[in-house]
Image: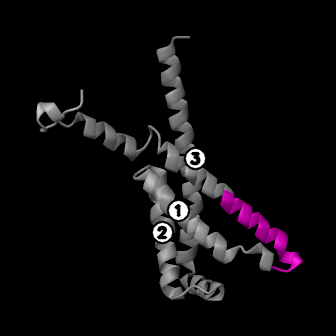
C-alpha cells in the first residue's frame, strides 16, 4: 500500500478514535453536570457532607465545570487545557469522595470501584492532554485557519 495512503488512513483512524473518546468522556461530565443542575440542593448537601468549604459555591462551581468542560471536550476546543482542568477536577473529586480506606467493608468494594473508575478517566484525559483533540475538532479547524492567515511579520521572521 502507498505510504501516503497509509499515513492518511492512520491519521483519519486516529482522529476518529479521538473524536469517539472525547464524546464518551464528555458525555460522562455532561450527564453528571446535568444531574447536579436538577438537584443543586442535594449536591450542596453532598458537598457539605464531604467537608468542602463553601459547599453551595462548590456545588455551582462543580456543575459549571462539568457542563462547560464536557461540551468543550466533545467539540474539541482547547482540548489539552480542558483535559488538564478535568484531571485536576477528578483528582480532587476522587480524593474527597472516594476514600475507600475510610469505609466499612460493606461499602469498601463500591468505593474502590469508583476510585479505579476515576483513575481510568484520568488516564483517558491524560491521553487527550498529550495527543490533543485530533482532526475532527475545533482545535484542528482553528489550526488550519491560522495557517491560512497571511503573515505580516518581516520575511526574516517568517517560517519556511
Which mark is in front, 2 or 1? 1
10 Å crowding of disc 1: few (<14), some (14-19), many (20+): many
N-terminal of the pair, mark 2 or mark 3, is: 3
**CB under 8 Å between callouts 2 and 3?**
no
In front: 106, or 158? 158
Q: Which labelled disc corresponds to residue 65?
A: 2
Residue under pointer 1: 86
Percent position of residue 152, x then y: 12, 38
According to the picture, the residue beneath numbered tag 3 turns out to be 21
Identify the residue at horizontal 50%, vertical 58% (top origin): 84
Q: Which residues are magenta?
A: 103-119
Estimate the x, y position of residue 50 in percent, counting from the top left: 65, 84
Distance from the alpha carbon under mark 2 to that under mark 3: 19 Å
Query: Which circle's residue, 1 or 3, is located before the other in the chain?
Result: 3
Locate the N terminus by quadrant.
Answer: top right
Answer whether residue 109 is magenta in the image: yes
Classify residue 148 as left or right of residue 92: left
Q: Secondary structure at mark 2?
A: helix
Callout 3: helix, strand or loop?
A: helix
In 3D space, how far apart are the residues under numbered discs 1 and 3 (Cα atoms)?
14 Å
Check disc 1 and report its element: helix, strand or loop: helix
Q: Local crowd at mark 3 within 10 Å, few (<14), some, or many (≥20)?
A: some
Amino acid at each position: 500500500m502507498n505510504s501516503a495512503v497509509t499515513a492518511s488512513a492512520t491519521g483519519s483512524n486516529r482522529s476518529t478514535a479521538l473524536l469517539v473518546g472525547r464524546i464518551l468522556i464528555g458525555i460522562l461530565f455532561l450527564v453528571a453536570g446535568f444531574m447536579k443542575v436538577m438537584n443543586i440542593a442535594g449536591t450542596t448537601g453532598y458537598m457539605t457532607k464531604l467537608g468542602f468549604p463553601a459547599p453551595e459555591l462548590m456545588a455551582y462551581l462543580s456543575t459549571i465545570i462539568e457542563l462547560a468542560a464536557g461540551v468543550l471536550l466533545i467539540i474539541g476546543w482547547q482540548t489539552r487545557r480542558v483535559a488538564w482542568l478535568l484531571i485536576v477536577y477528578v483528582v480532587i473529586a476522587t480524593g474527597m469522595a472516594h476514600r475507600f480506606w475510610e469505609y466499612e467493608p460493606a461499602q469498601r468494594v463500591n468505593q474502590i470501584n469508583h476510585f479505579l473508575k476515576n483513575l481510568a478517566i484520568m488516564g483517558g484525559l491524560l491521553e487527550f492532554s498529550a495527543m490533543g483533540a485530533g482532526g475532527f475538532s475545533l482545535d484542528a479547524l482553528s489550526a488550519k485557519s491560522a495557517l491560512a492567515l497571511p503573515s505580516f511579520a518581516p520575511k526574516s521572521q517568517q517560517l519556511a
